[in-house]
Image (cartoon, rainbow, N blue to C red):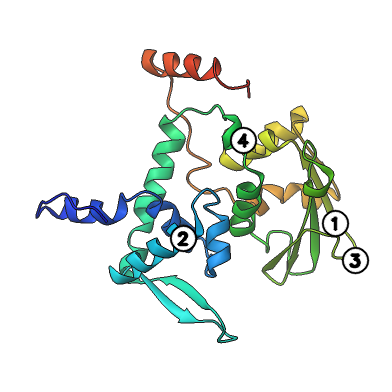
Amino acid sequence: MKGYGQFCPIAKAAEIFCERWTALVIRNLGAGAERFNDIHRGVPHMSATLLTRRLRQLEAEGLVTRRRSASGKSWTYHLTEAGAEFLPLVGALGVWGQRWTRRELAEGELDLGLLIWGLEHSVDPAAFGPERHVLRLDVNDQPAGKRLYWFVCEGGTLDLCVSDPGGETALYLAGTLRDLIHVYRGDVPLAAALETGRLTADGPPRLIWHLAAWFNFDAMATTTPAPEGPAQRAARRAAQSRVPAS
């Protein structure tokens, strides 16, 4: 990690936290990702080699600790007390980003894998009750082999399946990747997306009623974007000239 050559504590902390990818790696660990491959799924554009190096750097700095997995054949990664104290900063970055950064999505930002990873690590599996409930998500503008996902919620735990797990499917949810990201990110309220047909939900009214609790929207998703000033309007218009309309 590159240093600033200053004794200032802000500089010393920034040497660690502001290194490229570090905030996202800490975000992933804070979301509950422990195995290397699961952490990597949350940063798909980061090479495995760089992720390995960054985890080792964070371990050397005392922010991450490694433990043997239950099988003893691999490692799991966990935030230390020092690493966990970075999580409010990660959350503050997200809130600022939701409030001030552009909301249009470039084609390279329409990341199906990251959306599914984010849902897997953020939804509340207890929202429908302790009994087994299966939600099938249809990302209906994706190729046939990548559009269906089953979220099995039972006893407060979640299993993500890429093929039908069997048994009864309680709730069906469908939408395009772009619309699902906008709802997940908080740009479009869930109720408005359902009312306008940007998302469709089919199942018992009781479960549809609890769908917002299942999404478990966090402070980032519930932050209202700031009103546009002249500079923001100019940036939005420039972005709209480069990316498809949302």
Q: Nearer the viewer, mark 3 or mark 1?
A: 3
Label 2 crowd (10 A; few <14 / some 14-19 / many >=20): few
In the image, which is nearer the foreground, mark 2 or mark 4?
2
* Vertical placement of residue 14 versus 109, above or below: below
Where does residue 50 sit, x and y in percent of width and height?
43, 57
Residue identifier under label 1: 170
Q: CA distance from mark 3 to mark 4?
A: 30 Å
Name above or below for residue 136 compared with residue 201: below
- Could you tell which of marks 2 and 3 lies nearer the N-terminus? 2
State the residue lying farthest toward the front. 49
Do the residues under discs 3 and 4 have CB atoms within 8 angstroms? Answer: no
Tell me which amino acid carries mark 3.
Gly
Q: Residue at x 54, y 82 (%)?
A: 69
Q: Residue furthest right?
A: 167
Residue named by callout 2: 49
Q: Is residue 123 left or right of residue 39?
A: right
How many numbered circles are shown?
Answer: 4
Q: Which residue is mark 4?
A: 182
Label 3, secondary structure: give it: loop
